[in-house]
Image: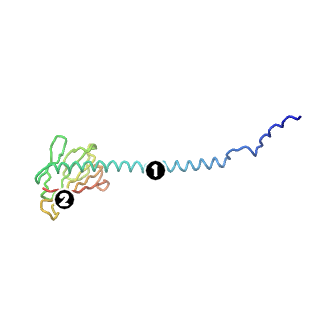
Amino acid sequence: MTPPAPPPTPSRSVIKAFSLIEVLLAIGIVSFAVVAIVGMLPIALNTAKDSMLETDSAVIAQRIFAELQAGTGTKRPVSINTNGDFKEIDLASDATNYLAFGDACEVRSSLGSDAPNTDMEVQFLGVVSVSTNTGISNLSRVEVSITSPASAPSSSRTTNTFVTLMGY
């Protein structure tokens, strides 16, 4: 009886492996994907910043509207600083009022205009405009425009506008 034959040894053509071309092609595809993802990061960061500014603007406008709605009569108080001082906004006459807000949406001061503000604690400028030309007596259109950043010239600011009708 003859012993069993040893199994055949694999030849070079049978061994499975990646060629250099395949490895380079895979690295190129992965590199292209990584560069595309890294290129999207600045866009995502700008979008997140804009979203935060819009949210803060909405919070400020809601606060102003809430203070106006809480008052009675034609002259309604709106806080102008953290000391409890307030500014009266007359709903019975057309007027424009300017307010400054900090980065925590707190009122910092009452301003004379919407010129750039150099105070580092002021992040937002608010403009409260009252218009009585609604066609209905004892009803005013109140528009609140919140712009940021406060230190930038008006052409470089982002503005969010909110409007409501208020009776008096």
Quadrant of the drawing holding the N terminus: top right
Q: Position of residue 65 (x, y in %)?
A: 20, 51
Query: Disc 1 marks which amino acid?
Result: Met
Coordinates of residue 51 in the picture (x, y in percent): 35, 50
Q: Residue furthest right?
A: 1
The kind of residue on which mark 2 rests is Arg
User: Do residues under tags 2 and 1 come within 8 Å of each other at their CB atoms?
Assistant: no
Q: Residue at x 18, y 53 (%)?
A: 97
On screen, residue 103 above or below 91: above
Label 2, label 1: how many angstroms apart (C-alpha)? 41 Å
- Badge 1 element: helix
Residue 113 is left or right of residue 9, and the answer is: left
Q: Nearer the viewer, residue 30 or 15?
A: 15
Q: Relative to 60, is 39 on the left or the right? A: right
Tell me the number on the disc at residue 40: 1
Residue at 18% from the left image edge and 46% from the top image edge: 80
Q: Residues within 10 Å of mark 2 (few under 14, many from 20)?
A: some
Q: Position of residue 78 (x, y in %)?
A: 17, 48
- Kindly identify which numbered label has been placed on residue 160: none
Q: Decide: is 6 above or below 163.
A: above
Dot 2 or dot 1: first in sequence order is 1
> Which residue corresponds to mark 2?
141
Query: Toward the viewer: 73 or 26?
Result: 73
Q: Residue at x 40, y 48 (%)?
A: 45
Decide: few, some or many residues near mark 1? Use Cα within 10 Å; few <14, some 14-19, many ≥20: few
Of residue 150 and residue 95, the one placed in the foreground of this image is 95
